[in-house]
Each structure stands twice: as C-alpha cells, then as structure tokens.
Image (tube, rainbow, N blue to C red):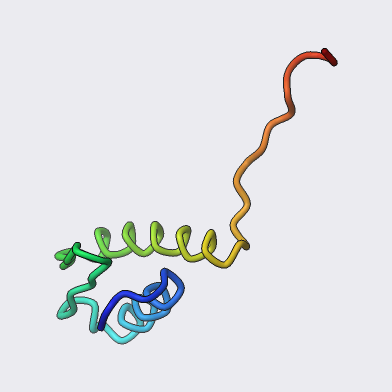
C-alpha cells in the first residue's frame, strides 16, 4: 500500500494493531520502510503518526505562550 496521508496510515496502523497484523506488516512513508519488532516500538510510532494525522486534519493544537513584555 502506497503512502497517501497520515490519517490513512493512522487508521491502517490502528486496525493492524487491533487485529495483531502489525507483527507481519511493513509500513512505508515515501522512501522509508519500517518494520516493528516490539509492541512498544509500534505504539511509539503510532503516537507519532497520530500527531501527524491530527496536524494534517488541523485538529492538532500546539501549545502557545503569551508574549513577554509590554507594548512597543
């Protein structure tokens, strides 16, 4: 399966994790191929993909801070 969007990859990874198929799959993003050996590695990658998918769908909110100092 060719990489299309982070959201599609997130959904695929979630489904594969729920079914246990993540152990036998290879995920690709562009020129990068990734295979996971442990559930911890897979979950860490899924967390990253979820943040990219959220940013892609613009539901991701980064922390913002008030500007220091007064006016001009």
Q: How many marks?
A: 0
Q: Residue furthest bottom?
A: 19
Q: Residue at x 63, y 52 (%)?
A: 61
Q: Position of residue 26 (x, y in %)?
A: 18, 74
Q: Position of residue 14 (x, y in %)?
A: 39, 77
Quadrant in the picture for residue 58: bottom right
Q: Residue furthest front?
A: 72
Quarter of the image where the N terminus is located: bottom left
Against 8, residue 63 (above or below) is above
Front position in the image: 33 or 39: 33
Q: Position of residue 69 (x, y in %)?
A: 77, 14
Quadrant in the picture for residue 31: bottom left
Is residue 57 found left or right of 23 in the rendered image?
A: right
Is residue 45 found left or right of 69 in the rendered image?
A: left
Front position in the image: 60 or 47: 60
Is residue 65 found left or right of 21 in the rendered image?
A: right
Q: Residue at x 27, y 67 (%)?
A: 29
Q: Residue at x 37, y 83 (%)?
A: 15
Against 44, residue 11 (above or below) is below
Q: Residue at x 46, y 73 (%)?
A: 7
């Amino acid at each position: 399966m060719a990489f299309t969007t982070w959201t599609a990859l997130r959904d695929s990874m979630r489904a594969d994790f729920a079914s246990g198929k993540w152990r036998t799959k290879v995920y690709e993003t562009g020129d990068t191929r990734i295979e996971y050996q442990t559930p911890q590695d897979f979950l860490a990658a899924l967390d990253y993909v979820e943040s990219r998918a959220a940013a892609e769908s613009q539901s991701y909110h980064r922390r913002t801070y008030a500007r220091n100092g007064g006016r001009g």
